[in-house]
Amino acid sequence: MSILLINGPNLNLLGTREISMYGNTSLDELEKMLSSMAKEHNINLICFQSNAEHEIINKIHDARNNDVKSIIINPAAFTHTSIAIRDALSGVGIPFYEVHISDIKSREDFRKFSYFSDIAQKVFCGMGLDGYKHALHEAIKLDI
Ligand code: DQA
């Protein structure tokens, strides 16, 4: 059984991007840490990052064929723009958790709205990278 972790645009720059906002851990380090957490529960974590909306949508569609039981997604800037990714998530009907490293509610006005939060199982926002760990715990609880 698998859980799919999706990180959206610019999150490949984690560790070097706006460090005061997003911290100095790289995406690779984050993915390794979460994968070993998942492994302890005999769960395979599929890690995916893309800067392209259509690639994220295709990955969500493929999830149905890959025994994916839940999705953890940080849609990054697509949070505030993408009805298409929202529709993909509701289209496949796989429960998902929304993560934001920063507290989007306390930043610029254009970040305050999320196209995902009302249909997410839970939203983890402003907890730094710990938000991913909490989301993974929740996803594992649901899956086992
Ligand atoms: C983000 C918040 C978004 O507004 C921003 O575009 C990101 C990252 C976060 O994790 O805090 O790229 O999703």
Image (cartoon, rainbow, N blue to C red):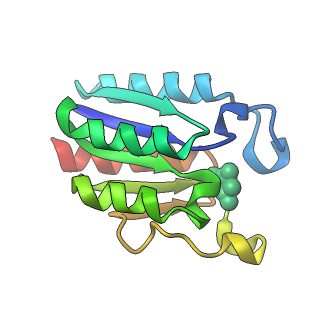
Which of the four quarters of the rendered structure image does ligand 1 lie in? bottom right
| Relative to 83, residue 53 above or below | above
Q: Which of the 4 image quadrants contains residue 30? A: top right
* Residue positioned most to the front: 54
- Occupied quadrant, residue 51: top right
Residue 124, how many percent across, how many down?
50, 59
Tell me where residue 108 appears, x and y as whole percent: 78, 72
Count the marks.
0
Relative to residue 43, is residue 127 depicted above or below?
below
Q: Quadrant of the C terminus?
A: top left
Q: Quadrant of the N terminus?
A: top left
- Tell me: 134 left or right of 15: left
Foreground residue, 134 or 104? 104
Indicate left or right for 122 with 33 as reference: left
* Residue 88 in view here: yes
Q: Residue at x 69, y 40 (%)?
A: 10
| Spot occupied by residue 8 in the image (x, y as percentages of width and height) | 57, 44
User: Horizontal and vertical percent for residue 11?
Assistant: 65, 39
- Residue 39 in which image quadrant: top left
Residue 67 visible (yes or no): no
In the shown orientation, is residue 101 left or right of residue 17? left
The residue under the point 39% across, 55% down is 97
Determine the residue positioned at 21% across, 30% down: 66
Could you tell me which residue is drawn at 83 percent across and 44 percent down? 18
